[in-house]
Image: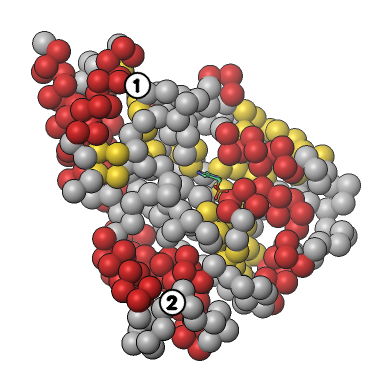
Amino acid sequence: MKHNFGAGPCILPKDVFTEASQAVLDFNGTGLSILEISHRSKEFEAVITEAESLVRELLEVPEGYSILFLQGGASQQFAMVPFNLLPNYGRAAYLDTGTWSSKAIKEAKNFGAIDVVASSSDRNYSYVPKSYTVPADAAYLHYTSNNTIFGTEIFDLPVADVPLVTDMSSDIFSRVIRVADHGLIYAGAQKNMGPAGVTLVVVKDELLGKTGRTIPAIFDYQQHAKADSLYNTPPVFSIYVSMLNLRWLKAKGGVSVMEQENIIKARKLYEEIDRNPLFRGTADVEDRSRMNVTFVMTNPALEEEFLALAKERGMVGLKGHRSVGGFRASIYNALGISSINALIDLMREFEEAQN
Ligand code: PMP
Protein backbone atom coordinates (compact mmCIF):
# COMPACT_ATOMS: atom_id res chain seq x y z
CA MET A 1 0.00 0.00 0.00
CA LYS A 2 1.21 3.49 -0.84
CA HIS A 3 0.72 6.58 1.28
CA ASN A 4 0.22 9.29 -1.31
CA PHE A 5 1.21 12.71 0.03
CA GLY A 6 1.37 14.23 -3.48
CA ALA A 7 0.22 17.85 -3.94
CA GLY A 8 -1.91 17.22 -7.01
CA PRO A 9 -2.99 15.31 -8.92
CA CYS A 10 -3.33 13.45 -5.70
CA ILE A 11 -4.97 10.70 -3.76
CA LEU A 12 -8.67 10.02 -4.35
CA PRO A 13 -10.73 7.37 -2.56
CA LYS A 14 -10.04 3.80 -3.64
CA ASP A 15 -13.75 3.12 -4.15
CA VAL A 16 -13.87 5.97 -6.64
CA PHE A 17 -11.02 4.41 -8.64
CA THR A 18 -12.75 1.03 -8.59
CA GLU A 19 -16.05 2.40 -9.83
CA ALA A 20 -14.39 4.66 -12.41
CA SER A 21 -12.35 1.77 -13.79
CA GLN A 22 -15.50 -0.31 -14.15
CA ALA A 23 -17.17 2.51 -16.05
CA VAL A 24 -14.25 2.61 -18.48
CA LEU A 25 -15.23 -0.93 -19.49
CA ASP A 26 -18.99 -0.73 -19.19
CA PHE A 27 -20.75 2.41 -18.07
CA ASN A 28 -23.89 1.62 -16.05
CA GLY A 29 -24.68 -1.50 -18.05
CA THR A 30 -24.92 0.44 -21.33
CA GLY A 31 -22.38 -1.86 -23.01
CA LEU A 32 -20.38 1.30 -23.75
CA SER A 33 -17.36 2.82 -22.07
CA ILE A 34 -17.75 6.17 -20.31
CA LEU A 35 -14.95 7.20 -22.68
CA GLU A 36 -17.03 6.62 -25.80
CA ILE A 37 -20.45 8.02 -24.93
CA SER A 38 -21.67 11.32 -26.31
CA HIS A 39 -21.54 14.32 -24.05
CA ARG A 40 -25.08 15.01 -25.31
CA SER A 41 -26.37 11.54 -24.37
CA LYS A 42 -29.00 11.20 -21.66
CA GLU A 43 -26.52 9.06 -19.70
CA PHE A 44 -23.96 11.86 -19.51
CA GLU A 45 -26.65 14.45 -18.92
CA ALA A 46 -27.54 12.52 -15.77
CA VAL A 47 -23.87 12.58 -14.70
CA ILE A 48 -23.32 16.31 -15.14
CA THR A 49 -26.68 17.12 -13.55
CA GLU A 50 -25.81 15.03 -10.51
CA ALA A 51 -22.32 16.57 -10.34
CA GLU A 52 -23.85 20.03 -10.33
CA SER A 53 -26.44 19.19 -7.71
CA LEU A 54 -23.79 17.59 -5.48
CA VAL A 55 -21.71 20.78 -5.68
CA ARG A 56 -24.80 22.84 -4.83
CA GLU A 57 -25.69 20.58 -1.92
CA LEU A 58 -22.21 20.07 -0.46
CA LEU A 59 -21.27 23.75 -0.64
CA GLU A 60 -24.83 24.93 0.12
CA VAL A 61 -24.75 27.23 -2.89
CA PRO A 62 -27.46 29.88 -2.62
CA GLU A 63 -29.77 31.05 -5.43
CA GLY A 64 -28.25 33.34 -8.02
CA TYR A 65 -25.01 31.44 -8.58
CA SER A 66 -24.05 29.38 -11.64
CA ILE A 67 -21.99 26.21 -11.38
CA LEU A 68 -19.64 25.70 -14.33
CA PHE A 69 -17.41 22.78 -15.29
CA LEU A 70 -14.67 24.20 -17.51
CA GLN A 71 -11.29 23.22 -18.91
CA GLY A 72 -7.89 24.90 -18.89
CA GLY A 73 -7.20 24.37 -15.20
CA ALA A 74 -7.11 27.02 -12.52
CA SER A 75 -4.49 28.77 -14.65
CA GLN A 76 -7.09 29.53 -17.29
CA GLN A 77 -9.15 31.18 -14.55
CA PHE A 78 -6.26 33.57 -13.88
CA ALA A 79 -7.21 35.07 -17.27
CA MET A 80 -10.94 34.36 -17.37
CA VAL A 81 -11.60 36.16 -14.09
CA PRO A 82 -10.35 39.59 -15.24
CA PHE A 83 -11.63 38.97 -18.78
CA ASN A 84 -15.16 38.62 -17.35
CA LEU A 85 -15.12 40.75 -14.20
CA LEU A 86 -12.67 43.61 -14.71
CA PRO A 87 -14.35 46.41 -16.66
CA ASN A 88 -12.50 48.16 -19.46
CA TYR A 89 -10.38 50.89 -17.83
CA GLY A 90 -11.30 49.48 -14.42
CA ARG A 91 -9.16 48.24 -11.55
CA ALA A 92 -9.02 45.14 -9.40
CA ALA A 93 -7.30 44.30 -6.12
CA TYR A 94 -5.13 41.23 -5.54
CA LEU A 95 -3.57 39.73 -2.44
CA ASP A 96 -0.19 38.17 -3.16
CA THR A 97 0.38 35.09 -1.01
CA GLY A 98 2.49 32.91 -3.26
CA THR A 99 3.27 31.51 -6.66
CA TRP A 100 -0.33 31.02 -7.70
CA SER A 101 -1.52 34.48 -6.67
CA SER A 102 1.51 35.98 -8.43
CA LYS A 103 0.56 34.18 -11.61
CA ALA A 104 -3.02 35.41 -11.28
CA ILE A 105 -1.73 38.96 -10.83
CA LYS A 106 0.53 38.74 -13.86
CA GLU A 107 -2.35 37.56 -16.03
CA ALA A 108 -4.80 40.17 -14.70
CA LYS A 109 -2.40 42.96 -15.64
CA ASN A 110 -3.28 42.23 -19.27
CA PHE A 111 -6.80 43.47 -18.60
CA GLY A 112 -6.60 46.59 -16.44
CA ALA A 113 -5.03 48.34 -13.46
CA ILE A 114 -4.12 45.90 -10.70
CA ASP A 115 -3.56 46.95 -7.08
CA VAL A 116 -1.52 44.42 -5.16
CA VAL A 117 -2.90 45.34 -1.73
CA ALA A 118 -0.37 43.27 0.24
CA SER A 119 2.26 40.61 -0.33
CA SER A 120 4.09 38.16 1.89
CA SER A 121 6.97 37.78 -0.57
CA ASP A 122 9.31 39.48 1.95
CA ARG A 123 9.44 36.24 4.00
CA ASN A 124 9.13 33.76 1.17
CA TYR A 125 5.34 33.61 1.54
CA SER A 126 5.53 31.94 4.94
CA TYR A 127 2.59 33.95 6.30
CA VAL A 128 -0.63 35.63 5.25
CA PRO A 129 -0.68 39.46 5.28
CA LYS A 130 -3.40 40.71 7.62
CA SER A 131 -3.54 44.49 7.39
CA TYR A 132 -4.27 46.10 4.08
CA THR A 133 -6.88 48.31 2.51
CA VAL A 134 -8.86 47.35 -0.53
CA PRO A 135 -9.77 50.33 -2.76
CA ALA A 136 -13.55 50.81 -2.81
CA ASP A 137 -13.52 51.22 -6.59
CA ALA A 138 -11.91 47.82 -7.22
CA ALA A 139 -14.12 45.49 -9.25
CA TYR A 140 -13.13 42.66 -6.90
CA LEU A 141 -10.48 41.38 -4.50
CA HIS A 142 -8.75 38.21 -5.66
CA TYR A 143 -7.01 35.91 -3.20
CA THR A 144 -5.81 32.32 -2.96
CA SER A 145 -7.43 30.62 0.03
CA ASN A 146 -4.81 27.87 0.31
CA ASN A 147 -1.25 28.31 -0.85
CA THR A 148 -0.40 24.83 -2.02
CA ILE A 149 3.33 25.47 -2.37
CA PHE A 150 4.02 27.51 0.77
CA GLY A 151 1.64 25.73 3.15
CA THR A 152 -0.42 28.70 4.33
CA GLU A 153 -4.19 28.97 4.36
CA ILE A 154 -6.59 31.89 4.80
CA PHE A 155 -9.33 30.94 7.25
CA ASP A 156 -10.77 34.41 7.93
CA LEU A 157 -12.37 36.21 5.04
CA PRO A 158 -10.43 39.24 3.83
CA VAL A 159 -12.17 42.45 4.81
CA ALA A 160 -13.33 44.24 1.68
CA ASP A 161 -16.40 46.06 0.44
CA VAL A 162 -16.00 44.56 -3.00
CA PRO A 163 -16.80 41.05 -4.29
CA LEU A 164 -14.32 38.38 -3.24
CA VAL A 165 -12.87 36.19 -5.99
CA THR A 166 -11.21 33.15 -4.52
CA ASP A 167 -8.87 30.53 -5.92
CA MET A 168 -9.82 27.50 -3.79
CA SER A 169 -8.00 24.94 -5.92
CA SER A 170 -6.39 23.21 -2.98
CA ASP A 171 -8.89 23.59 -0.15
CA ILE A 172 -12.32 23.44 -1.72
CA PHE A 173 -14.54 20.76 -0.11
CA SER A 174 -12.05 20.48 2.79
CA ARG A 175 -13.84 22.89 5.11
CA VAL A 176 -17.13 24.71 5.42
CA ILE A 177 -17.36 27.96 3.50
CA ARG A 178 -20.16 30.43 2.93
CA VAL A 179 -20.52 30.78 -0.82
CA ALA A 180 -22.63 33.92 -0.34
CA ASP A 181 -19.49 35.69 0.93
CA HIS A 182 -17.87 35.24 -2.48
CA GLY A 183 -18.54 36.68 -5.91
CA LEU A 184 -16.67 33.89 -7.63
CA ILE A 185 -14.89 30.73 -6.52
CA TYR A 186 -12.76 28.61 -8.80
CA ALA A 187 -10.80 25.41 -8.33
CA GLY A 188 -8.86 23.05 -10.55
CA ALA A 189 -10.35 19.66 -9.72
CA GLN A 190 -7.17 17.72 -9.10
CA LYS A 191 -7.01 17.97 -5.30
CA ASN A 192 -10.25 17.40 -3.42
CA MET A 193 -12.73 17.26 -6.29
CA GLY A 194 -11.50 14.74 -8.84
CA PRO A 195 -8.94 14.11 -11.56
CA ALA A 196 -7.20 16.84 -13.55
CA GLY A 197 -9.02 18.09 -16.63
CA VAL A 198 -12.01 19.89 -15.19
CA THR A 199 -12.17 23.18 -13.32
CA LEU A 200 -15.05 24.18 -11.09
CA VAL A 201 -16.36 27.74 -11.19
CA VAL A 202 -19.10 29.00 -8.86
CA VAL A 203 -20.07 32.49 -9.93
CA LYS A 204 -22.67 35.03 -8.83
CA ASP A 205 -24.67 35.74 -11.96
CA GLU A 206 -25.24 39.41 -11.26
CA LEU A 207 -21.51 40.13 -11.58
CA LEU A 208 -21.40 39.03 -15.20
CA GLY A 209 -21.83 40.93 -18.45
CA LYS A 210 -20.60 44.27 -17.12
CA THR A 211 -17.10 44.74 -18.54
CA GLY A 212 -17.98 46.52 -21.76
CA ARG A 213 -15.63 44.29 -23.72
CA THR A 214 -16.22 41.54 -26.22
CA ILE A 215 -15.31 38.18 -24.73
CA PRO A 216 -14.64 35.23 -27.04
CA ALA A 217 -17.40 32.69 -26.35
CA ILE A 218 -15.07 30.00 -25.04
CA PHE A 219 -13.82 32.39 -22.33
CA ASP A 220 -17.23 33.84 -21.50
CA TYR A 221 -18.80 32.59 -18.24
CA GLN A 222 -22.25 33.65 -19.45
CA GLN A 223 -21.98 31.47 -22.54
CA HIS A 224 -20.95 28.46 -20.46
CA ALA A 225 -23.73 29.14 -17.94
CA LYS A 226 -26.33 29.46 -20.68
CA ALA A 227 -25.21 26.13 -22.14
CA ASP A 228 -25.09 24.35 -18.75
CA SER A 229 -21.34 23.69 -19.25
CA LEU A 230 -22.05 22.03 -22.62
CA TYR A 231 -21.05 24.96 -24.84
CA ASN A 232 -18.45 22.60 -26.29
CA THR A 233 -17.35 19.05 -25.47
CA PRO A 234 -16.67 18.99 -21.74
CA PRO A 235 -14.10 16.72 -20.07
CA VAL A 236 -16.58 13.87 -19.73
CA PHE A 237 -14.42 11.44 -17.76
CA SER A 238 -13.08 14.06 -15.33
CA ILE A 239 -16.62 15.24 -14.61
CA TYR A 240 -17.77 11.66 -14.13
CA VAL A 241 -14.98 10.83 -11.65
CA SER A 242 -15.55 14.13 -9.83
CA MET A 243 -19.21 13.19 -9.50
CA LEU A 244 -18.22 9.84 -7.97
CA ASN A 245 -15.86 11.58 -5.58
CA LEU A 246 -18.55 14.07 -4.52
CA ARG A 247 -20.93 11.16 -3.92
CA TRP A 248 -18.22 9.66 -1.68
CA LEU A 249 -17.89 12.95 0.19
CA LYS A 250 -21.65 13.16 0.69
CA ALA A 251 -21.78 9.58 1.99
CA LYS A 252 -19.06 10.45 4.51
CA GLY A 253 -21.31 13.12 5.93
CA GLY A 254 -20.35 16.09 3.77
CA VAL A 255 -17.94 18.96 4.13
CA SER A 256 -18.42 19.61 7.86
CA VAL A 257 -17.55 16.00 8.76
CA MET A 258 -14.57 16.17 6.40
CA GLU A 259 -13.44 19.41 8.02
CA GLN A 260 -13.39 17.79 11.46
CA GLU A 261 -11.26 14.93 10.13
CA ASN A 262 -8.93 17.36 8.39
CA ILE A 263 -8.49 19.39 11.58
CA ILE A 264 -7.49 16.25 13.49
CA LYS A 265 -5.12 15.03 10.76
CA ALA A 266 -3.35 18.38 10.45
CA ARG A 267 -3.13 18.91 14.21
CA LYS A 268 -1.51 15.51 14.76
CA LEU A 269 1.12 16.10 12.13
CA TYR A 270 1.94 19.67 13.22
CA GLU A 271 2.20 18.48 16.83
CA GLU A 272 4.89 16.02 15.83
CA ILE A 273 6.72 18.63 13.74
CA ASP A 274 6.73 20.98 16.75
CA ARG A 275 7.72 18.28 19.24
CA ASN A 276 10.42 16.53 17.23
CA PRO A 277 13.69 18.48 17.45
CA LEU A 278 14.75 17.22 14.02
CA PHE A 279 11.94 19.03 12.22
CA ARG A 280 10.64 22.58 11.86
CA GLY A 281 7.50 23.94 10.17
CA THR A 282 8.07 26.64 7.55
CA ALA A 283 4.78 28.58 7.81
CA ASP A 284 3.76 30.88 10.66
CA VAL A 285 1.77 28.82 13.15
CA GLU A 286 -1.44 30.89 12.87
CA ASP A 287 -1.46 30.59 9.08
CA ARG A 288 -0.67 26.90 8.75
CA SER A 289 -2.53 25.07 6.02
CA ARG A 290 -4.63 22.02 6.83
CA MET A 291 -4.04 20.69 3.34
CA ASN A 292 -0.33 21.18 2.62
CA VAL A 293 1.99 20.76 5.59
CA THR A 294 5.40 22.24 4.77
CA PHE A 295 8.40 21.47 6.95
CA VAL A 296 12.17 21.12 6.85
CA MET A 297 14.83 19.43 8.94
CA THR A 298 16.90 21.45 11.37
CA ASN A 299 19.86 19.67 9.80
CA PRO A 300 19.18 19.82 6.05
CA ALA A 301 21.91 17.26 5.43
CA LEU A 302 19.56 14.59 6.78
CA GLU A 303 16.67 15.36 4.45
CA GLU A 304 17.71 13.08 1.65
CA GLU A 305 18.06 10.13 4.00
CA PHE A 306 14.65 10.78 5.53
CA LEU A 307 13.06 10.99 2.10
CA ALA A 308 14.68 7.74 1.01
CA LEU A 309 13.41 5.99 4.11
CA ALA A 310 9.92 7.39 3.59
CA LYS A 311 9.99 6.04 0.07
CA GLU A 312 10.97 2.61 1.37
CA ARG A 313 7.86 2.72 3.59
CA GLY A 314 5.62 3.48 0.64
CA MET A 315 5.29 7.21 1.28
CA VAL A 316 5.31 9.14 -1.96
CA GLY A 317 5.02 12.80 -2.94
CA LEU A 318 6.69 14.12 0.22
CA LYS A 319 9.47 16.15 -1.37
CA GLY A 320 8.91 19.86 -0.83
CA HIS A 321 8.46 22.27 -3.72
CA ARG A 322 11.81 23.68 -4.86
CA SER A 323 10.86 27.19 -3.68
CA VAL A 324 10.50 26.00 -0.06
CA GLY A 325 12.69 22.89 0.09
CA GLY A 326 12.37 20.16 2.69
CA PHE A 327 9.07 18.34 2.72
CA ARG A 328 5.46 18.92 1.91
CA ALA A 329 2.85 16.49 3.13
CA SER A 330 -0.35 17.13 1.22
CA ILE A 331 -3.09 15.65 3.35
CA TYR A 332 -6.20 16.03 1.25
CA ASN A 333 -9.65 14.61 2.05
CA ALA A 334 -9.00 11.09 0.79
CA LEU A 335 -5.77 10.64 2.77
CA GLY A 336 -6.63 8.60 5.84
CA ILE A 337 -5.33 9.08 9.36
CA SER A 338 -3.33 5.85 8.98
CA SER A 339 -1.08 7.61 6.49
CA ILE A 340 -0.55 10.49 8.93
CA ASN A 341 0.31 7.94 11.62
CA ALA A 342 2.77 6.20 9.31
CA LEU A 343 4.59 9.47 8.68
CA ILE A 344 4.65 10.39 12.37
CA ASP A 345 5.98 6.93 13.27
CA LEU A 346 8.79 7.38 10.79
CA MET A 347 9.66 10.83 12.16
CA ARG A 348 9.89 9.36 15.68
CA GLU A 349 11.93 6.43 14.52
CA PHE A 350 14.30 8.75 12.74
CA GLU A 351 14.68 10.84 15.88
CA GLU A 352 15.51 7.77 17.96
CA ALA A 353 18.04 6.59 15.40
CA GLN A 354 19.90 9.92 15.72
CA ASN A 355 20.31 9.53 19.48
N1 PMP B 1 -4.00 27.65 -7.86
C1 PMP B 1 -3.61 26.83 -6.86
C2 PMP B 1 -3.89 27.20 -5.45
C3 PMP B 1 -2.94 25.64 -7.18
O1 PMP B 1 -2.57 24.81 -6.21
C4 PMP B 1 -2.70 25.31 -8.54
C5 PMP B 1 -2.03 24.03 -8.96
N2 PMP B 1 -1.43 23.29 -8.03
C6 PMP B 1 -3.10 26.21 -9.53
C7 PMP B 1 -3.76 27.37 -9.14
C8 PMP B 1 -2.88 25.93 -10.99
O2 PMP B 1 -3.77 24.96 -11.35
P1 PMP B 1 -3.79 24.26 -12.78
O3 PMP B 1 -2.58 23.44 -12.89
O4 PMP B 1 -5.07 23.49 -12.72
O5 PMP B 1 -3.84 25.34 -13.80
Instruction: Please provide percent x and percent y for residue 308.
Output: 25, 27
Label 2 secondary element? loop
Please state if 252 lies on the left or on the right of 234 as rendered: left
Residue assigned mark 1: 296
User: What is the spatial separation of the Cα atoms under label 1 and label 2, in whole angstroms?
Assistant: 43 Å
Relative height, residue 272 to residue 332 (above, below): above
Say few, some or many: other residues with alpha carbon within 10 Å of mark 2 (under 14 / 14 to 19 / 20 or more).
Answer: many
Q: Amino acid at mark 2?
A: Ile
Label 1 amino acid?
A: Val
* Residue 124 in view (yes/no): yes
Q: Which residue is mark 2?
A: 34
Q: Nearer the viewer, residue 296 or 66?
A: 296
Q: Is 319 positioned to the left or the right of 46 in the image?
A: left
The residue that appears at 29% across and 45% down in the rendered structure is: 4
**Secondary structure under the numbered disc 1 in the rendered image:** strand
List x then y, in percent, for residue 212: 88, 60
Q: Quadrant of the C terminus?
A: top left
Q: Residue at x 42, y 49 (%)?
A: 9
- Residue 266: image tag: none
